[in-house]
Image: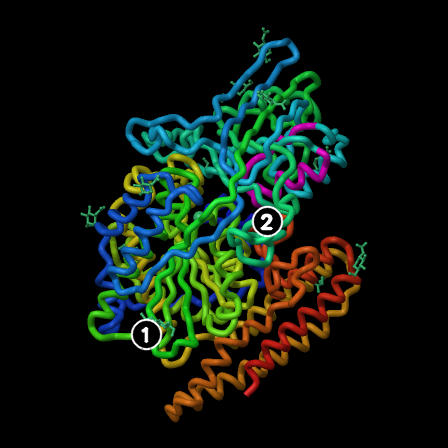
Amino acid sequence: MKFAFAVALAFGTAVYACQRDHSALGHSSHATRRLSRRQAAFPPTLTEQESILANSFDNNTISDWSYYYTHGDHIAGRNRSQAQWTADRWSENGFTSSLAEYHVYLNYPVSKSITLSYPNGSSYTPSLEEDVLPEDETTGYPNRIPTFHGYSFTGNATAEYVYVGRGQQVDFERLVELGVPLEGKIALAKYGGPFRGLKVKNAQSYGMIGAIIFTDPGDDGNVTEANGYAAYPDGPARNPSSVQRGSVQFLSTYPGDPTTPGYPSKEDSPRADKSVVTPSIPSIPISYEEVIPLLAALDGYGTPGNQVNRTRWVGGLNVTYSTGPAPGAVISMSNVMEDAYTPIWNAVGVINGTSQDEVLIIGNHRDAWLIGGAADPNSGSAIMIELSKAFGRLLETGWQPKRTIVLASWDAEEYGLVGSTEWMEEYIPWLTGSAVAYLNIDVGCSGPRPSLSATGDLHTIAVETMRKVIFPQGEAMNETLFDVWFAENEGVVGVLGSGSDYTSFLHRGISSLDVGSDANPNKNDPVYHYHSNYDSYHWMATYGDPGFRVHTAMGQYLTLLAYHLVTDDLLPFDIPNYAEQMQLYYDELLTVINSTSSQLDTNELLAAIDVFETRAAEVVALQQQAQATGDAALLEVVNRKYKDFSRGFTSQGGLPDREFFQHVLFAPGLDTGYAPVTYPGITEALQAGNVTLAAEWVTKTANGILVAANILKT
Ligand SMILES: *[C@@H]1O[C@H](CO)[C@@H](O)[C@H](O)[C@H]1NC(C)=O
Ligand SMILES: *[C@@H]1O[C@H](CO)[C@@H](O)[C@H](O)[C@H]1NC(C)=O
Ligand SMILES: *[C@@H]1O[C@H](CO)[C@@H](O)[C@H](O)[C@H]1NC(C)=O
Ligand SMILES: *[C@@H]1O[C@H](CO)[C@@H](O)[C@H](O)[C@H]1NC(C)=O
Ligand SMILES: *[C@@H]1O[C@H](CO)[C@@H](O)[C@H](O)[C@H]1NC(C)=O
Ligand SMILES: *[C@@H]1O[C@H](CO)[C@@H](O)[C@H](O)[C@H]1NC(C)=O
Ligand SMILES: *[C@@H]1O[C@H](CO)[C@@H](O)[C@H](O)[C@H]1NC(C)=O
Ligand SMILES: *[C@@H]1O[C@H](CO)[C@@H](O)[C@H](O)[C@H]1NC(C)=O
Ligand SMILES: *[C@@H]1O[C@H](CO)[C@@H](O)[C@H](O)[C@H]1NC(C)=O
Ligand SMILES: *[C@@H]1O[C@H](CO)[C@@H](O)[C@H](O)[C@H]1NC(C)=O
Ligand SMILES: *[C@@H]1O[C@H](CO)[C@@H](O)[C@H](O)[C@H]1NC(C)=O
Ligand SMILES: [Zn+2]
């Protein structure tokens, strides 16, 4: 999937990554350790094996792979041959590859319509289609995929309607405060902020009977037609007809097949009630060009946008963003979907390591909402083929990894991380015993600004590896990925929320990392048309990454990072940094406690962090001893601790009312879906005003940290 959310108030822009949430940077910046800048040596010096890997990258073949993936229907469950093609390329490069099939619930679009009837009897009917552009051939494919919401509800709704801002809980609370009637009305919501499925969930929970979600150019920074930029395909601004598709699953409750929570979807698997995580009101996405009459008809009714006093309520269109409803202005909407219980295919490729009880998984999804999908997700898919080629070159020299490498090309990520979640659910006992880490690349490139989120143990190796890659910005060619990433992110590694396939692994206690490179229109990057037909090969080659040079750098990075994780005698984990991160999250928790004026005793948590810190220092001492003496048995003891300790962070029953999410240190926010919350059990109980529950979670969180610390104990 991908997903957009505001990058922190501090930066005030929207960034898309298959749901990479940069807002984490903003809200927690006061508590986030910033690395100090140390210029990377230029050019970087690589070892012989690192050079073989980096030099095997070729922007021309990456472009070929990108072209392949972006010229055929590959929505979830509809393209087995593309899965097989992926497995075949990996096989050619030395990975033993096959397909893993699951039978899952999906739904596909049949028809939809919206009609606005004005009080005077005339009406407006938007086309709900994106323009076909002669310059961009895949936008005109006869089998191009309609605009729709995955897992949306089949139904009709006819009612007056209300503009609900970004559709967060707080937006609805504000509307109630303003006396705006919601019950029985249709919600008109803006994209941005929370995951789209949660907008629909919130509307539904306030008794609304339908939802329409629109793209707003106010989230495109400076790069807008209003500012004089030409729109795609003539320039970098958003094409006015572009529509954001996407899933409306209630992602923060549980991901995966809605009908098989907690177990893999086989043909004969029992099926659970899906209404827990899928909407029961219809929803339809719409472009900014076509939403204008809907917004304009509310002008002068209800509370004007500038009086609602909610962040980002007013967008970039020439309307007042009034709440409405406008008496007598009625929308009739109809959404028809076809249910399917259908096969999906993950491609899985393996190179056995010499130490087979240690496994690194590198994953990317393959399915897209579009014929294209050049950024989301197939920039990552193209990179994964090139990565397999690089390891193939190294295998030819006689190299074998110490640890097993598993490559995964997931299907049905867009609907709700379905392929990765079902696979995890099938192999969880093996993963619990063997996985050292999961590395994710979804949108490998939608622009020139690299971004990284990871669990604390992976920060150091992830950042150090950036110094080894030349990042092709501008003509100078004198900067490393580290230089560019540092300048972009102030040296802050993000916290994982959700929105891509690392989620299932992270929440079973597997150290995880997510990497990609994004666009920031506030810095004048071309606008990325997230989940639109214009996320195409033509857009990528013309605006997103001309020359495929960012693809190349991101691929070299992921390859070198994976190389060290599977080759180094000692897993290159930084355990003391994990302790430091916990301390930072703790400082943040204190401010939450303060801001909610709650009385909550958190000493038990603080004590657990202290114990973890002590154990971390001890295990580092043991590691140094192992390295100094070269004692192989001792090295393996340390490796095992590094592999296993993070399983301790999981809490068996999961978070309140969302059993799937087990990690006690971070989770996607219940009402954000993408953006992370740290110490989620405690923080969300406080936000809900339940101090009793928060106190229970202080204990559960402390226990998780102590179990992890105990595994590290020397
Ligand atoms: C599957 O994808 C490939 C490559 O994008 C494309 O050539 C092929 O037509 C697609 N198959 C189907 C059934 O759409
Ligand atoms: C009815 O109202 C709409 C919106 O104000 C306007 O655009 C349209 O011209 C009106 N139609 C007639 C027949 O007056
Ligand atoms: C919005 O905020 C302004 C400035 O603080 C205030 O004057 C106004 O009354 C507020 N509007 C509402 C509807 O509360
Ligand atoms: C914005 O809308 C108003 C009222 O419809 C109109 O008078 C004004 O010309 C519009 N401004 C722009 C820049 O289109
Ligand atoms: C829903 O709306 C569509 C389009 O207006 C119409 O064809 C269909 O009959 C309606 N269905 C029901 C059950 O009202
Ligand atoms: C890799 O190891 C597994 C488990 O030991 C074994 O079943 C498989 O045949 C091996 N694959 C190759 C290509 O050696
Ligand atoms: C690269 O070169 C540009 C232009 O000469 C310069 O502004 C920039 O500081 C250099 N960057 C590094 C990391 O040396
Ligand atoms: C964006 O536009 C604003 C206002 O027009 C201007 O002040 C700012 O410098 C622009 N930023 C960039 C990066 O061009
Ligand atoms: C690959 O890079 C070379 C050198 O910069 C460039 O000439 C070529 O056009 C690029 N290939 C593609 C497919 O963009
Ligand atoms: C709590 O908030 C008050 C008022 O904003 C502030 O003075 C105090 O320093 C805060 N305490 C902590 C522990 O953040
Ligand atoms: C608060 O949490 C406790 C403990 O889980 C639970 O028993 C209680 O019902 C909750 N209170 C409210 C108001 O939700
Ligand atoms: Zn994606």
Q: Nearer the viewer, mark 1 or mark 2?
A: 2
Q: Is residue 213 left or right of residue 228?
A: right
Secondary element under disc 1, as helix, strand or loop, is: loop
| Quadrant assignment for ligand 10 | bottom right
Q: Earlier in the sequence, mark 1 or mark 2?
A: 2
Q: Secondary structure at mark 2?
A: loop
Q: Nearer the viewer, residue 527 or 486?
A: 527
Please name the amino acid that badge 2 sits on: Thr
* Residue 191 drawn in magenta: yes
The amino acid type, in three-letter code, at marker 1 is Pro
* Total labels drawn: 2
Instruction: Give the labeled residue for mark 2.
Output: 259
Tell me the magenta residue range.
Answer: 185-207
Q: Which residue is denoted by mark 1 in the rendering?
A: 401
Q: Work out whether 709 lies above or below 682.
A: below
Residue 681 falls in image quadrant: bottom right
Residue at 64%, 31% in the rendered image: 210
Label ID, residue 146: none
Image vertical order of residue 581 relative to residue 594, above or below: below
Residues 642 and 398: in front is 398
Sort mark 1 into few (<14), some (14-19) or many (20+) by Cα contacts within 10 Å: many
